[in-house]
Image (tube, helix red, strand yellow):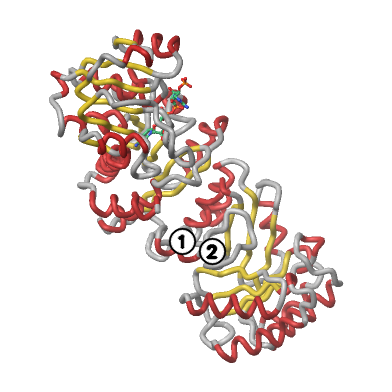
Amino acid sequence: MSTRAALPKVCIALGLPTVDKLLEQASKEVAAGESFLEFRLDYLPRPEAGLKAIQDFLGKHPDVSLLATCRRHQNHGKYDGLIEDQIRILDAAIDAGAHAIDVEIETAEKIVARLEPMRAKAHLIVSWHDYEGTPPLEPVLRRMLKVPADGYKVVTTARKPSDAARVLALKKAHPKVPLILLAMSETGFASRVLCNAQGSLYTYAAPNAVEGTASGQVSARLLRQLYRIDKITKAAKVYGVVADPVRHSLSPNVHNRAFQARRLDAVYLPFLVKPAQLKDFLGFCESLPVQGFSVTIPHKQKIIRYLDAVEPLARRIGAVNTVWKKAGKWRGTNTDALAVTKPLSKRIKLNRSTVLLVGNGGAARGAAFALADAGAKVVITGRNADRVRAFAKLCGAEALVRAELKDRKFDALVHATPMGMFPHVNECFFDGDLPADVVFDMVYNPLETELIRRASAQGSAVIPGLEMFLAQAAEQFEIWTGESAPASVMEKAAREALK
Ligand code: NAP
């Protein structure tokens, strides 16, 4: 490959403590199909030892593009030497075959003339990092543009969702400047997925098998296969799940696979949004092509105040789990409610049934209103008699304490507490026989809970939590896209993610 060929779109950052480990990992990445690697020479005890490694590696893998970095510790790297030694090493890295070098602005602005001949041989990426936050970026870019370069890398740390949007917006304000834009941290994750589509020269990913070099980095495999960063365009519709924590959500797996199956130019992201950041998140949505999102703990109630229209059942439940944009207005509904009545109505006639609901939290609330709307008689139980009574009064249901359940039998039982959820997999609200012929457990991790296992053993029909999860996700998909949800693809994705 000529040293000046365009750089590929995903760079794998490799920071390892020995040359052997670096080469071993680099070979693994190439075997996994990667073609753009960053060698962090500053991670080696003797960065000079990396030069021969570059030469040997490129001798074996001439099609790989290699970016060499030797960041000084003053600038959050690990290299202890002087600027002149740093530049000597990077120049030697180019001579060893590196196609690009990354020089932090703090060094680059001191040696502009010295960089010019190096730039004739390789791409010069001038980089600026902020490991604490995302300050105003125009002054940063003005400073960087004083150094002639082939790419300007602006990396901040997102403290709130709008930080990631501001970093990406730099490209809109400077369409002609070759930029690499990223906001680190889990809050900034959207920038890692969206930056290429928004015009970044490339994005960074963690190695496929070992840890990355920056916060919020995920593997290249995940970026390509799940988030389809090579496929989505600048016009891609953006969706996601708003939660805190969000890391373990199944929804990105399920919805991205569904978009892929329907060949939609759309992507679904995990949005880490802290309780006080909902308003900021809506600002983020306005500056990117966000068309809708799922809402989960702890935002289901609070989101309502920011919406232009809320469907009546969701308003009565007091919780919204699905938001979409229509004619510039944010609308909300609750697909959890229908996801309770839909699977149940396949098994029983709800308007002639008595349903026992266990729990008095958010999910129980949605279920109680939806079941009552469908004509079922609802009976509520839980561990705290006062809370159960207050909740039952609110939704016109009967309240029972656990001891009163002994002599009663119900057409169906809906369990809406976290009991039995991983890691407490042996927990179950009931001691003896289950008082219903149809048992619905909202818990979906594990796929077969203790409650479902016991229901099956006593011959009751079972509705596992995954069925509810998939029903609410399918309805979300249909609201957002207007297309039928690819049910089997979504189920396969959820099962794979739960493994
Ligand atoms: P939540 O608002 O936190 O409510 C939890 C409820 O469970 C409260 O009534 C709480 O009682 C009760 N509870 C908690 N620990 C308990 C224990 N050890 N013994 C007895 N009761 C206990 O949570 P949520 O949003 O309603 O969710 C409840 C469950 O449903 C979770 O496991 C969630 O993952 C699942 N869920 C599944 C789906 C799906 O799509 N399958 C959708 C929504 C929710 P107190 O009031 O006494 O604290």
**Residue at (35% x, 8% y) in the render:** 393
- Name the residue type under label 1: Leu
Q: Residue furthest right?
A: 82
* Residue 12 seen in render: yes
Mark 2 crowdedness (10 Å alpha carbons): few <14, some 14-19, many ≥20: many
User: Contact (CB < 8 A) between labels 2 and 1?
Assistant: yes
Dividing the picture into quadrants, the one containing residue 461 is top left
* Residue 312 seen in render: no
Q: Is residue 57 above or below residue 348?
A: below
**Residue at (55% x, 31% y) in the render:** 275
- Name the residue type under label 2: Thr
**Where is ligand 1, by quadrant?**
top left
Q: Position of residue 391 (x, y in %)?
A: 38, 13
Q: Which residue is mark 1?
A: 223
Q: Position of residue 187 (x, y in %)?
A: 56, 45
Q: Position of residue 341 (x, y in %)?
A: 22, 29
Dividing the picture into quadrants, the one containing residue 349 is top left
In this orientation, which residue lies closer to the viewer: 438 or 233? 438
Give the alpha-carbon distance from disc 2 to disc 1, as whole Å.
10 Å
Describe the element under mark 2 as helix, strand or loop.
strand
Q: Which residue is mark 2?
A: 203
Q: Position of residue 488 (x, y in %)?
A: 23, 52
Q: Nearer the viewer, mark 2 or mark 1?
A: 1
In the figure, is residue 400 to the left or right of 143?
left
In the rendered view of the protein, which quadrant contains the C terminus?
bottom left
